[in-house]
C-alpha cells in the first residue's frame, strides 16, 4: 500500500501505525471484510424478544434474545397481554445487548429492520413502536420485515442456495410449503387448514402434563414430545396420518389432536388416574404422535416436490428443500424428510436449531 505524503507531494511506503489507522477508518474487524452496511434486526412477533446486528455480507456481529417460554409454559399457552408486557420489559435491554456485543454504536447502523407481520398484534406492536422511535431518534431508514420470508431466507446466511427452492416452515404458529422464486417472490403451495404442528404438539404435551415430568419440565411441548418419544414405542398406538386422500399440499393437525385427546382420556380411565397425572403410557403416546406428525409432514412435502418437478418449477437434478421453524429442530421429523429428499434427488437443508426458531439474525 502507498500513501500520498501531502507535504512532499510524493507516494511513500506507510508506517505500520499509518496502515492500522487507515484500516480503522474503514471500521475493519479481524476476520471480516470492510463493513459498510450494518443492519439492526428486531423480532417480537410471538414470544421471543430478539435483536441482532448483521453486516451486508451476512456476518453476524452480535445478538441477544429473551425467551418467554418458561412463563408461557406455566400459564399453559401464550397469553397475548402477558407476552406484550414481557416484550416491553425486555426490548430495550435486548437491543442494547445486541449492539454492545457487536461493538457497534447506534450511529454506525445503516438501517433498522423489524418484523411487522404476521404474528400476535400486541407483541408485534412493541417491536414496531420501539423501532420507530429509534428510527426517528437516529434518522436511519426502516426496513419492514415479513416474518415468514425471514424464516425462509435465513438459510442463505449459511449456504449458497440459488432461487428457486422449496421451503417448509413448521413451528408453533406457522405451517406452510412455498416455492421461493426470489427475495420477496413466494408461491404458496400449501398451508395448515387449522393449527400448526408445534401448536398441536404443545397441546398434546400439556394434556399429558409433561411439565410435571422431571426430565421435561423446562422444555417446550414439541421438545418434550421428542425427548419422551425416544423411550416409547411408536407402534403401540396406531394414529392415521391426516388428509391421506387430499390431492393438494395442505396440512391439518386438529383431527389428530382430538384423537390423541380421546386416547389419553381412555388411558386415564384404564389406569385409574386423574387428569393432570402422568400416564404410564405417556412415552408411547409421544412416540406415536411424533411418528404420525412426521409421516403427515413428509407426505405433503413429497407431493409438493413432485408437483414442482412435474411443472419444471424446480430443477430436476439440483432441487433444494429448506426446512425451518421450531418444529424443524425435531430430528425424527428431519429424518422423515430426508427419506423424501433422498427418494426425489433433492438436497435437504436445515438451519441449525438456533436459527430455526425465532431470532433477531433472520430479521437483520
Ligand atoms: O419457531 P418457533 O420458535 O416459534 C414460532 O412458533 O414461531 O417454534 C416454536 C414451536 C413450539 O410449538 C415448540 O413446541 C416447537 O416449535 N418445537 C419443537 C421442538 N422444539 C421446539 N417441536 C418438535 N420438536 C422439537 N424438538
Ligand atoms: Zn417464527
Image: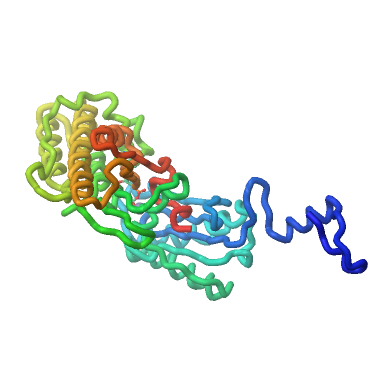
The image quadrant of residue 12 is bottom right
Q: Is residue 335 left or right of residue 289?
A: right
In this rendering, the answer to whether 212 lies above or below 23 is above
Spot occupied by residue 30 in the image (x, y as percentages of width and height):
67, 47
Spot occupied by residue 90 in the image (x, y as percentages of width and height):
49, 57
In the displayed image of the protein, which residue is found farthest to the right?
8
The image quadrant of residue 274 is top left
- Tally of marks: 0
Q: Is residue 39 left or right of residue 281?
A: right
The image quadrant of residue 268 is top left
Spot occupied by residue 323 in the image (x, y as percentages of width and height):
33, 44
Spot occupied by residue 340 in the image (x, y as percentages of width and height):
24, 36
Q: Can the viewer see residue 76?
A: no
Q: Residue at x 62, y 55 (%)?
A: 100
In this rendering, the answer to whether 101 lies above or below 244 is below
In this rendering, the answer to whether 113 lies above or below 49 is below
Using the image as rendered, state which of residue 229 and residue 261 is in the foreground.
229
Q: Residue at x 59, y 57 (%)?
A: 99
In which quadrant is the N terminus drawn? bottom right
Using the image as rendered, state which of residue 331 and residue 88 is in the foreground.
331
What colouring does the structure picture have? rainbow
In the displayed image of the protein, which residue is found farthest to the left?
245
Q: Is residue 269 left or right of residue 30?
A: left
Q: Residue at x 49, y 68 (%)?
A: 131
Q: Residue at x 25, y 48 (%)?
A: 199
Q: Can the viewer see residue 88?
A: yes
Amino acid at each position: 500500500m502507498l500513501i500520498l505524503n501531502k507535504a512532499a507531494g510524493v507516494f511513500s511506503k506507510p508506517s505500520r501505525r499509518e496502515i492500522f489507522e487507515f484500516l480503522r477508518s474503514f471500521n475493519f474487524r479481524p476476520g471480516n471484510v470492510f463493513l459498510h452496511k450494518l443492519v439492526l434486526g428486531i423480532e417480537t412477533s410471538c414470544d421471543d424478544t430478539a435483536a441482532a446486528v448483521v453486516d451486508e455480507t451476512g456476518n453476524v456481529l452480535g445478538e441477544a434474545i429473551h425467551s418467554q417460554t418458561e412463563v408461557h409454559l406455566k400459564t399453559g399457552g401464550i397469553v397475548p397481554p402477558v407476552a406484550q408486557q414481557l416484550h416491553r420489559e425486555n426490548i430495550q435491554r435486548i437491543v442494547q445487548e445486541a449492539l454492545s456485543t457487536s461493538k457497534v454504536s447506534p450511529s454506525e447502523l445503516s438501517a433498522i429492520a423489524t418484523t411487522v407481520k404476521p404474528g400476535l398484534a400486541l407483541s408485534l406492536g412493541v417491536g414496531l413502536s420501539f423501532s420507530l422511535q429509534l428510527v426517528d431518534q437516529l434518522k436511519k431508514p426502516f426496513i419492514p420485515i415479513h416474518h415468514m420470508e425471514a424464516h425462509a431466507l435465513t438459510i442463505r446466511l449459511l449456504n449458497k442456495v440459488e432461487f428457486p427452492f422449496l421451503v417448509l416452515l413448521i413451528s408453533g404458529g406457522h405451517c406452510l410449503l412455498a416455492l421461493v422464486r426470489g427475495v420477496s417472490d413466494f408461491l404458496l403451495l400449501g398451508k395448515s387448514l387449522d393449527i400448526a404442528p408445534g401448536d398441536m404438539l404443545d397441546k398434546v404435551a400439556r394434556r399429558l402434563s409433561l411439565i410435571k415430568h422431571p426430565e421435561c419440565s423446562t422444555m417446550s411441548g414439541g421438545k418434550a414430545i421428542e425427548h419422551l418419544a425416544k423411550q416409547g414405542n411408536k407402534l403401540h398406538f396406531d394414529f392415521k396420518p391426516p388428509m391421506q386422500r387430499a390431492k393438494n399440499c395442505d396440512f391439518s393437525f386438529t383431527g389428530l389432536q382430538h384423537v390423541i385427546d380421546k386416547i389419553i382420556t381412555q388411558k386415564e380411565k384404564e389406569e385409574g388416574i386423574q387428569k393432570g397425572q402422568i400416564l404410564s403410557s405417556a412415552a408411547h403416546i409421544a412416540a406415536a404422535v411424533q411418528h404420525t406428525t412426521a409421516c403427515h409432514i413428509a407426505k405433503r412435502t413429497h407431493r409438493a416436490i413432485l408437483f414442482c418437478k412435474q411443472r419444471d418449477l424446480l430443477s430436476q437434478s439440483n432441487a433444494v428443500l429448506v426446512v425451518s421453524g421450531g418444529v424443524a429442530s425435531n430430528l425424527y421429523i428431519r429424518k422423515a424428510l430426508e427419506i423424501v429428499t433422498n427418494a426425489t434427488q433433492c438436497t435437504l437443508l436445515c438451519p441449525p436449531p438456533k436459527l430455526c426458531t425465532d431470532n433477531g439474525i433472520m430479521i437483520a
